[in-house]
Image (cartoon, rainbow, N blue to C red):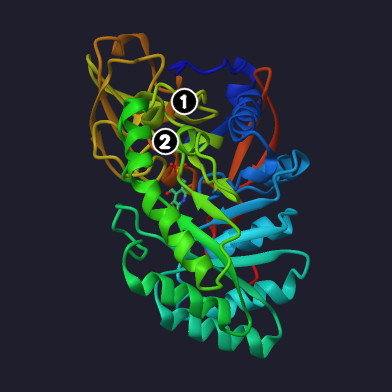
């Protein structure tokens, strides 16, 4: 992965607030292209929007024929449907007020099919009653726990088949397939990642066979994230869909951990030196309100210009660096930082500046960073 970033003209840098976020359009478009090439067909992609959260990016996808998308919040679902997605999956058991909100989404956007995931009968029964009452149909994917142990039902648990059969029979619901997310597969070696995915895959196929034998169709299998994207593309299974999200903007963390992936960081945080409190120290205006406190302190961003700088402190508004190059900088000087984990950082910004050939050409709203849009 490239650890460098495209240049921004100094006239453009002068106009950029710090802290702020920029997206390099060419990098973004190249990542979308690489994702499409890997998927083989737009129909096989269901990108997760939890990181990009922007209508303009969804429109770029829709122009390429990618109309199926995945979301983690109701606001993301609404942003997706408003931007032209026609098949939106909320990767959660709908609970509490979200049951009514899912039904409200389906009523507001009749041209879009909405689905949720589930691993328990209580939310699906409540969703079925609410959907039937509103005369809408909501798809339900069985959430299969393939080892991450965050959500899902174990594939060899007999309750998995009976739950999915129940989904297929309940009014207001549509049996939409399986959701197979595996964020625990983090092997740097692609070969080891592929072996791990192949090992879990047979139990998914066996569960599919049992469900279909019980007259519950499994039309789709929504699989994986960015690290396992190249693993699932090798598997032959009708209805398979790939769900990477981070790869759209990508980051230094995935770039370092998974060098086989063809993506490059497309987003950066703009920061300025605000102080040089000692001869080997710089203080920047990117505290943890500008760069998420994830991963642990010390490795939250990568500075292509200062690759060896030690991130010594990270407070609300400040990041302290230790570097022998501190004397090259004065207050006001700009640095670009590549987030190590872009997903929680992009959610900290209301809008991002789009960079074309070193210039700011437009700003995009990060619409679904809010928890609620209208529903
Ligand atoms: C359920 C689910 N699907 C897909 C993804 C996308 O994974 P990645 O960030 O590796 O692209 C995530 C990421 O958190 C997720 O939670």
C-alpha separation, residue under disc 2 versus residue under disc 1: 8 Å
**How far across and down, in percent of the image, does residue 338 sit?**
43, 27
Mark 2 crowdedness (10 Å alpha carbons): few <14, some 14-19, many ≥20: many
Residue receiving disc 1: 261
Front residue (pair 304, 266): 266
- Please identify the quadrant where the C terminus is shown: bottom right
Picture quadrant where residue 29 is located: top right
Picture quadrant where residue 85 is located: bottom right
Front residue (pair 209, 77): 209
Q: Residue at x 48, y 60 (%)?
A: 208
**Mark 2 near ligand 1 (CB under 8 Å)?**
yes
Mark 1 crowdedness (10 Å alpha carbons): few <14, some 14-19, many ≥20: many
Q: Please say if the residues under marks 2 and 1 sit with CB atoms less than 8 Å apart.
A: yes
In the image, residue 128 above or below residue 374: below
**How far across and down, in percent of the image, does residue 342 sit?**
44, 38
Residue 329 visible here: yes
**How far across and down, in percent of the image, does residue 48 sit?**
54, 49
Front residue (pair 157, 33): 157
Q: Residue at x 55, y 71 (%)?
A: 216
Q: Secondary structure at mark 2?
A: loop
Q: Residue at x 38, y 21 (%)?
A: 303
Q: Which mark is residue 227?
A: 2
**How far across and down, in percent of the image, does residue 127 sit?**
54, 81
């Amino acid at each position: 992965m490239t650890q460098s970033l495209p240049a921004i003209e100094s006239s453009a840098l002068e106009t950029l607030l710090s802290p702020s976020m920029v997206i390099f359009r060419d990098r973004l478009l190249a990542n979308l292209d690489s994702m499409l090439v890997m998927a083989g067909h737009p129909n096989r992609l269901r990108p997760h929007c939890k990181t990009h959260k922007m209508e303009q990016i969804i429109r770029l996808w829709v122009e390429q024929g990618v109309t199926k998308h995945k979301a983690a919040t109701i606001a993301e679902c609404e942003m997706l449907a408003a931007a032209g997605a026609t098949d939106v999956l909320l990767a959660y058991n709908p609970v509490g007020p979200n049951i009514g909100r899912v039904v409200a989404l389906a009523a507001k956007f009749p041209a879009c099919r909405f689905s949720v995931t589930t691993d328990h009968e209580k939310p699906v029964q409540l969703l079925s009653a609410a959907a039937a009452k509103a005369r809408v149909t909501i798809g339900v994917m069985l959430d299969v726990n393939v080892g991450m142990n965050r959500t899902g039902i174990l594939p060899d648990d007999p309750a998995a088949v009976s739950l999915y059969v129940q989904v297929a029979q309940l009014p207001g619901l549509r049996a939409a397939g399986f959701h197979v997310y595996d964020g625990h597969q983090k092997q740097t070696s692609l070969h080891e990642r592929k072996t791990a995915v192949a090992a879990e895959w047979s139990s998914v196929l066996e569960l599919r066979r049992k469900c279909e034998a019980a007259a519950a169709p499994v039309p789709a299998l929504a699989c994986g994230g960015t690290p396992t994207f190249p693993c699932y593309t090798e598997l032959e299974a009708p209805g398979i869909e790939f769900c990477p999200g981070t790869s759209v903007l990508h980051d230094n963390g995935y770039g370092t951990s998974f060098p086989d992936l063809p993506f490059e960081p497309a987003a950066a945080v703009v920061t300025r030196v605000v102080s040089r409190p000692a001869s080997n120290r710089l203080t920047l205006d990117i505290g943890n309100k500008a760069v998420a406190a994830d991963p642990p302190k010390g490795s939250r961003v990568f500075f292509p210009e200062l690759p060896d700088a030690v991130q010594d402190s990270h407070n609300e508004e400040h990041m302290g660096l230790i570097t022998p190059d501190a004397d090259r900088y004065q207050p006001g000087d700009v640095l670009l930082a590549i987030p190590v984990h872009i997903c929680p950082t992009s959610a900290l910004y209301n809008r991002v500046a789009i960079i074309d050939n070193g210039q700011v050409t437009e700003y995009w709203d990060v619409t679904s960073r809010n928890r609620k849009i209208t529903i």
